[in-house]
Image (cartoon, helix red, strand yellow):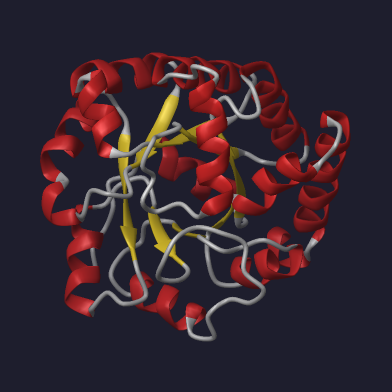
Amino acid sequence: MSTSTGSALTGIFREAGHPLLMPYAVGGYPDLASCREIIRTYVKNGAQLVELGIPFSDPLADGPVIQAASQVALRQGVRPADVLDLAGTASQEGAGVVLLSYLNTILAFGGERFFHRCRDRGVLGVVVPDVPVEEAAELQAIARAHGVDVILLAAPTSTDARLARIAGNASGFIYCVSTTGVTGARTSLRTDLAEFVARVRRHTDLPLVVGFGVSTAEQAAEVAGYADGVIIGSALVDLVARSKRFDEALAEIGRLLYRVRSMPSFSR
């Protein structure tokens, strides 16, 4: 088993003593001011960590809901620097912030400059879904020099040898993808998801966080029974997209997160 040296991000999970809810938002969607309110609603409803996506023109890991929201943000001129500023506001207001960014965005910004800005804005970690463990070392070294974790992903199709390699190089937490394919709400989770998380856990003592497809309070509660964190993304973004009024969207978000946090598995 790989034993972690610990980081600020890892510490948040360990100090919590219960599984953490990590809601996701597309940075700058539906606009910058409204996105700020969405993040505040997340925090008011018990989110100690927030995942904030940097809009990208070709988000290969994202399904139609997040792709559409990203396009709206991009058309409004939202740039990585704007999302980093959103992260800074969220961090100042008490949220632990994890970004999701595709590699091209980081390279265009400049790796050193990007992670320096992450540190200054209080970002704890960055999920880079298109960087596999075999290609992550250089990016991780730059991020680590600035006190930021690059979060590695593990998939249910990964062999035990590959999971061991991911665990040996991971920091912060490991993002356990609940299913193959892209993000998006699903009516049910894989029947072998708990077994997959258990396989990952045999290789590491880092926190394990499950994302992709978790969309209901019941699904989140199921995952919290065996994982250290749960990411809800597309379902929350879709609430904003489908609501006729933004205040109604915030109310719906609050109700969903309250239901999730009220589930017994989140207080174990």
x%, y% of residue 7?
35, 38
Compared across the picture, whether 141 is left or right of 246 comes to left
Can residue 268 be seen in the rendering of this structure? no
Q: Is residue 254 left or right of residue 105?
A: right
Left or right of 89, for residue 143? left
- Residue 58 occupies quadrant: top left
Residue 222 in the image: state x and y as whole percent: 65, 73
Name the image quarter holding residue 6.
top left
Residue drawn at x 82%, y 41% as measured from the top left: 243
Q: At 45% across and 42% down in the image, what residue appears? A: 11
Which residue occupies the foreground of this view, 11 or 245? 245
Q: Is residue 105 left or right of residue 70?
A: left
Give above or below for 173 relative to 178: above
Which quadrant is home to the C terminus? bottom right
Query: Measuring 55% from the left and 22% from the top, which residue is drawn there?
Result: 91
Please identify the quarter of the rendering in which residue 252 is found: top right
Query: Visible in this render: residue 28?
Result: yes
Up the image or down, 118 lies above or below 257; here it is above
The vertical placement of 20 against 84, above or below, is below
Residue placed at 82% from the left, 49% from the top? 258
Quadrant in which the N terminus appears: bottom left
Percent across and percent down for residue 53 are 48, 36
